[in-house]
Image (tube, coloured by chain):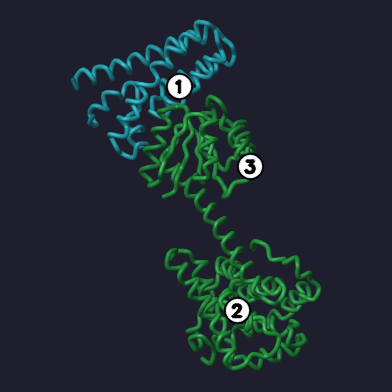
Chain colours: A cyan, B green
Amino acid sequence: MKTDTLDRYSKVLDVQDLVSRCMGNIDFACRVLQILSERCDSDMEGLEQAAAQSDFDQVYHISHRLKGAFANASAKNMSRLADEVCSASRDKNESDSLEKTCKLRDEWDEFMAMVRSELDQAI
Amino acid sequence: MTKVLVIDDDPVSAEMLRGTLEHFGYEVQYECDGVEGFERIRSGEYSIVISDWDMPGMRGDELCRMVRDRQWSGYIYFILLTSHGDMAHLVSGLRSGADDFLVKPFHPEELRVRLRTGERLLAMESRDVLLFTLAKLTESRDNETGLHLERMREYGRVLTEELSLWKEFKDEVDGDFVQMMYLTLPLHDIGKVGIPDSILLKPGKLTTEEFEVMKQHAAIGGNTLAAAVEVNPHAKYLQIARDIAYYHHEKWDGSGYPFGLAGDNIPLCGRITALADVYDALTSKRVYKDKFSNDKAKSIILEGSGRHFDPRIVEAFLANEERFLEISRQLDSSHAKAEAPPLVPATV
């Protein structure tokens, strides 16, 4: 991946921040995004299930982990949403927890669509 | 290469840490939960641990508490890394014994600075332990009690503190020099470990040949510490320790040993130690002599000004005569128990 490819992610990521924290190393930044896409998909599914079952402990645990992962990838909006899910689960607020999880899912799908399109182009 | 153990169940965070730490030249190992992390720490291979807070198996603060509850071969510098940036978590993390606290997402430069702080602390621990061990070794070859070394470093501190106030020494003698002298002065006679017992512990006067052998202790000590400087050329404390060992028997007029250096060619730390050593020898009871009064010791030192001693060091001594007397009184070997050597790791 090149810098211009990374720029396409700017709708869901703070690309400049990510590249800066990867010390200008584009390959390193891409590796971080690849791990994010591979490992967080299952966490997103787990979060939705836990939210649907009102398992607040599990919702808190997963959303907290996602918040950290998104923050590390400079996905600031997703990190903020994950933090809101965290707060809702701590307050045991069922509707809020579900609503914020849905918003996070939308954002995540947008990110994953970009990753898939990237992969399609590579093939 | 310093090994860092990263414990984090979030693979994105772990990758960020791995990439960043490797970029800065660290060797990185990774565990994804606290229990496995603790097992890794038990291998004794890691002096720096970076741990996430929320992890399966064990939380980071719990892990830190477990690490602190055990005795290890060396200090483990523990950094907690978390998305919890609030004061309650910060306080709780530090209470668990963590040395530092980093909030996600971290910036590489911030991480680098914090690791340097940790490495400095670890290096200081190594330095103090090394100096303490060497001083104890020196002490084991000294037929006086350990209070001789204790007095020596106190005399050295008085002289260096005095010189630090003098304009002509301001570039050479600062607070750091005072501290380095204090830490290393007990090593001045470390070369005595290479002198045979028959000479070192001889109760009577040495023959000319025996004295020649005894004189070798300065070169033996200097050479030993010079070898340490070679492998660690930036360690200022080793350079000072080396110079003290080499030059504390040099005389201002060039009649000393092992090199016969004169005047300012003798490093300052050697000139300072020479006066402290002679004053202590004069005012202490030895197997071959009674202790001299302060007045007699003072007159011998004054007589040696410009011959044995740097006149400026003698002047510094005169300006602090009362402090010398006080140290001599407080750390009088005849009141000490030889079986309980008092030398403790240095603190200034």
- Helix, strand or loop under label 3: loop
The image quadrant that residue A102 belongs to is top left
Query: Residue, x 53% and y 75% (percent of image)?
Result: B221
Chain under numbered label 2: B
* Gap in angstroms between the C-alphas marked 3 and 1: 33 Å
Task: Out of B105 and B155, give the one closest to the viewer.
Answer: B155
Residue type at mark 2 is Thr
Query: Residue, x 63% and y 34% (percent of image)?
Result: B92
Between disc 1 and disc 2, the foreground one is 2
Residue B66 rendering spot, x and y as whole percentages? 62, 36
Between disc 3 and disc 1, the foreground one is 3
Q: Which residue is mark 3?
A: B70
Q: Which residue is mark 2?
A: B273
* Gap in angstroms between the C-alphas marked 1 and 2: 62 Å
Q: Which residue is mark 1?
A: A66
For the residues bearing labels 3 and 1, Cβ distance under 8 angstroms = no
The answer to whether tags 3 and 1 share a subunit is no
Residue B61 rendering spot, x and y as whole percentages? 59, 33
Between disc 3 and disc 2, the foreground one is 3
